[in-house]
Amino acid sequence: MNNKPWLQYYPDNVPAEISPSEDTLIDLYDAITQKCPSKAAISCHDHSLSFAEVDRYAEHFAAYLQHELGIKKEDPVAIMLPNLLQFPVVLFGLLKLGCIFVSINPLYTEVEVKEILEDSEAKAIIVLSTFAHLIEPSLGTLPHLKHAMTTDLVDLYPFPKKQLIHFVATYLKGMKPHYSKGKFHHFKDTLNYQKPLNKANISPDDIACLQYSSGTTGKPKGTILLHRNIVANVHQVWAWLRGDVELDKQVIIGALPLYHIFALTANLFTFYLMGSKQVLIPNPRDIKSLVKTLQKTPFTIFNCINTLYMALLHNDAFRQSTFPHFKHTLSGGMSTTERVANDWKAVTGIEIKEAYGLSEMSPAVTMNKFDDGDGFNGTVGYPLSSTELTIRNDQGEILAQGEVGEIWVKGPQQAQGYWKLEEATKEHFLADGWLKTGDLGYLDHKGRLTISGRSKNMLIVSGFNVFPKEVENAILKMPEVDNVAVVGAPSKSSGEKPVAFVVLTEGASISAKDITEFCYTQLAHYKTPKDIFFLDELPKNTVGKVMKEKLKEEYILNQGEA
């Protein structure tokens, strides 16, 4: 088998290898700040900050943390924010300090947030005030968590926009915070902080972030990404796009959440660090507001996932709009269906290009060409420069093109392993440098990758990883539940959805609604089973293992796709 069969089909001027870089993320950030200080960098709710303004706020924020809170290089610090102006300010401020940033999904419950704070040993957290009540119970109970800081939605907006948005959010949308303000520091106090920042000496081999997802055991799993890994991935994406996209002249719609690795790299780092403008969308589920932003913004790039494509295509105002500057859209995080891709092309004139990645690869591994003229091809494209990819059987032997097996990858963007999980690291990160992804797929005649499924027990719900074990552990906290099995089932709206099969303890009586409401206190909504069935016992094989595939097959057969 040709070692890299995809190279002969590469776009013109895309190198087989990228040059090794000794830059850090802060080196790239400082370079673009100096290059175009007055240019608009980020925008939200029609208010923009220039690259110099972002840098000034990030510098003040970092200095405040350094002098007032004692935060220093290599301290893990959590960010629990939606896509607001504060997110990049906080992120780049932490990188200036040499901190390890830990992104936390604001949709998580108090239980999920505490698990990540405890596992990461975060010294501090910055949280939107609306979600501060989820943090407060952890204050004083976690030995490493010394400080918490809130920011209000409007902290970086000028008068009168600040007053208007505050009124709408608080009184019309019910986003009034409920927490003890005396227990928190406040982001607005950092904005004009005067003590100078003592610069940290940051190396490419320093940890930049811990990127968390749920683990197969139901506990959070932090992927260790160095500056070197993320910078390599940024250079790989730049090399791939440069022939088709003027990377410094784009306007990107940032609807995908920046706490997710796809948006963090594909949107923020890839385009911010080249000088393009990001238009941040705090709540992409508010389709009406999102469409209004799209209508009035001369955007050129809108990276998306299948569920958001679908939601927009079901909106009449979107379908009736024209977007004359729109040029490219990249899909990741979950599979894009052919029907959605065809409908999107019919409505917008833009072809969806799929890509594949995972947190362990910073995340980009493969990407389709933007100018291949093939239309939607169902593959996730070609491995990026300096990326090796093979398909293996259960014995680790390389399979021929067209054969389905586990996807193994290797490249400079590869993570260093999992935080405090030595066994899981050894299982996936092999001594010879290969990463066993747990995903199944095959390479076609051009060396393009097609994803067939997953060998590991994981669902992807609207682009988010959901591990059944985590959902099962939550449901088993209910004393009425004796046993439970959670499986993934197809969903037209979210790609997959969790379905629970529950066995109650003898004499117990609870409803599906009771379980759902309890799950909402333990899990993010997208992790909560949408269908719950009660059984007298779970089907098991001869060695006593629950036969989840049988449960899934019977569900699909009897219920159909929903």
Image: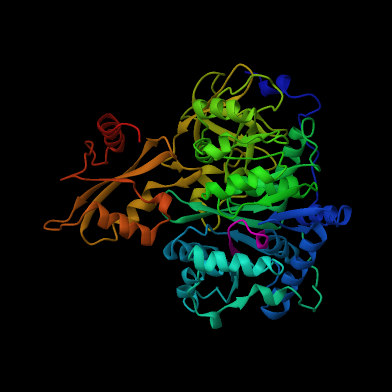
Is 107 inside the magenta-drawn segment?
A: no
Is 84 inside the magenta-drawn segment?
A: yes
* Residue pictured at 25% horizontal, 31% vertical: 558
- Where is residue 459? Give x, y as percent: 43, 41
User: How many numbered discs, if any?
Assistant: 0
Quarter holding residue 197: bottom right
Q: Is residue 329 visible?
A: yes
Vertical side of 257 occupied by 449: above or below: above
Quarter holding residue 505: bottom left
* Residue pictured at 81% horizontal, 43% vertical: 248
Q: Is residue 377 left or right of residue 314?
A: right
The residues colored magenta run 78-87
Vertical side of 245 occupied by 171: above or below: below
- Where is residue 423? Give x, y as percent: 49, 51
In terms of depth relative to the viewer, which is nearer, 451 or 303? 303
Q: Is residue 507 left or right of residue 148?
A: left
- Where is residue 117? Give x, y as percent: 52, 66
Quarter holding residue 239: top right
For this orientation, the residue located farthest to the top is: 445
Q: Is residue 362 visible?
A: no
For this orientation, the residue located farthest to the left is: 507
Q: Quadrant of the C terminus?
A: top left
Q: Is residue 200 left or right of residue 104?
A: right
* Residue pictured at 62% horizontal, 50% vertical: 416
- Where is residue 188? Give x, y as percent: 67, 74
